[in-house]
Image (tube, rainbow, N blue to C red):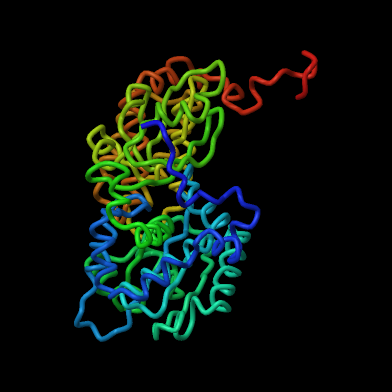
Amino acid sequence: MTTLTPILSQNWDRPDSFTIDGYRATGGYDSLRRALTMEPDSIVDLVKESGLRGRGGAGFPTGMKWGFLPKDNPNPRYLVVNADESEPGTCKDIPLMLANPHVLVEGVAIASYAIRSNQAFIYVRGEVVHVVRRLRQAVADAYAAGLLGKDVLGSGFDLDVVVHAGAGAYICGEETALLDSLEGYRGQPRLKPPFPAVAGLYASPTVVNNVESIASVPGIVANGAEWFTSMGTEKSAGFGFFSLSGHVTNPGQYEAPLGITLRELLDMAGGVRAGHQLKFWTPGGSSTPIFTEEHLDTPLDFESVGAAGSMLGTRALQIFDETTCVVRAVGRWIAFYAHESCGKCTPCREGNFWMVQVLDRLERGEGTEADIDKLLQICDNLLGRSFCALGDGAASPVMSSIKHFRQEYVDHFEKGGCPFDHSRSTVWADRPTTEEGGNQ
């Protein structure tokens, strides 16, 4: 497997890729026209046959989630797109919405028709104002073209779409906290069951899907389930964005079939930055257990990554070379989780706070062997015991880093401080200084 599959990113190099004219010039909204001639249930079946799984991290089958909506519930149905991308290292949905917002709008229209919803919401992280503006313009242009609103394309189907800007809380990436925020409440996860499919937004049947999941639907409608399953693996079908960042020569978005390996992606990205070697990396963002060089050939699909001890997550591949202090990196991640914990449950609220204290102590060289065991004990009280997955995600990098780099933790207190020169891991570390005749 050595080729990329530019599908959602195919026209990103067009200067007008984000406009409705640019999108329609490349076949945009043809899938919506086709979908409106189909029975809604047949679209759900098509998505099930394609094997499309959630692209937001958990990997739950998308068509199956759509099929969970109860048929006897008299309340209106809602589609909610989770565009609250905010995990460290995760950066695929925002560039997708920026470069090609109409593929999301078209996906929203098709998915809404399939689940018989007449109201859809796109919940976007409030800090990305440029994305919010672009999405709202795309929605306005779609309304003007008769692609949204009353009697879409003369089909008799009505659909209203609202682009909602959140207030900037990581916890709102959790679907039920997002729904609370959308209703005007403080974003905190709900107790499940009931699940959103039964009692979601406004206590009505609701489907919550990731941006990339919904944006993949027009391609499936246009090309069929077999086209989608021809890519990826048997259980992890299709393609997806792999976001390479950190110590890599050419960071960016690489759209490839699921099952590709980091070794293959690094070959395409020019490898780890010149003169350095891979130390550790994340397969799915900072909330997934870290991998090392021994995992370079692990197929990046849901099953293989899980079998190797981590999670595919959002395919946010953060690359770290040998100049990086793993204690410092993990400490910064946990400081983020401590700050973003909603505080609703004790394990997450207290556990992340105390892990920050212990990791800071170790980083200063003031820790002991007992502190490493203390971190593992806190993780044990977080994993599977917090109200939502934030606690599990915070425990993952700590536990996996101790598993792979315990000696590095020990070195911090045996040597009286961090043994790394932190400036060596910066992007400008290998550039010549002005004294050497170069640019600083």
Q: Is residue 388 left or right of residue 420?
A: left
Q: Residue 378's x, y, as percent?
A: 31, 40
Asked where in the image residue 256 lies, by quadrant, the reply is: top left
Q: Residue 275's x, y, as percent?
A: 55, 15
- Above or below 124: residue 200: below
Give the total of numbered labels. 0
Q: In this view, does 273 lie to the left or right of 379?
A: right
Which quadrant is the C terminus positioned in? top right
Residue shown at 61%/52% (left/top)? 14
- Above or below 124: residue 41: below
Q: Residue 234's x, y, as percent?
A: 22, 43
Q: Which of 348 and 253 is in front in this view?
A: 253
Q: In this view, does 78 lie to the left or right of 169?
A: left
Q: Can residue 311 be seen in this view?
A: yes
Residue shown at 33%/54% (left/top)? 54
Residue shown at 37%/46% (left/top)? 239
Which quadrant is the N terminus positioned in? top left
Q: Is residue 55 left or right of residue 29?
A: left
- Above or below 282: residue 30: below
- Above or below 231: residue 218: below
Q: Residue 184's x, y, as percent?
A: 46, 75
Residue shown at 42%/70% (left/top)? 32
Q: Nearer the viewer, residue 88 or 234?
A: 234
Q: Is residue 173 visible?
A: no
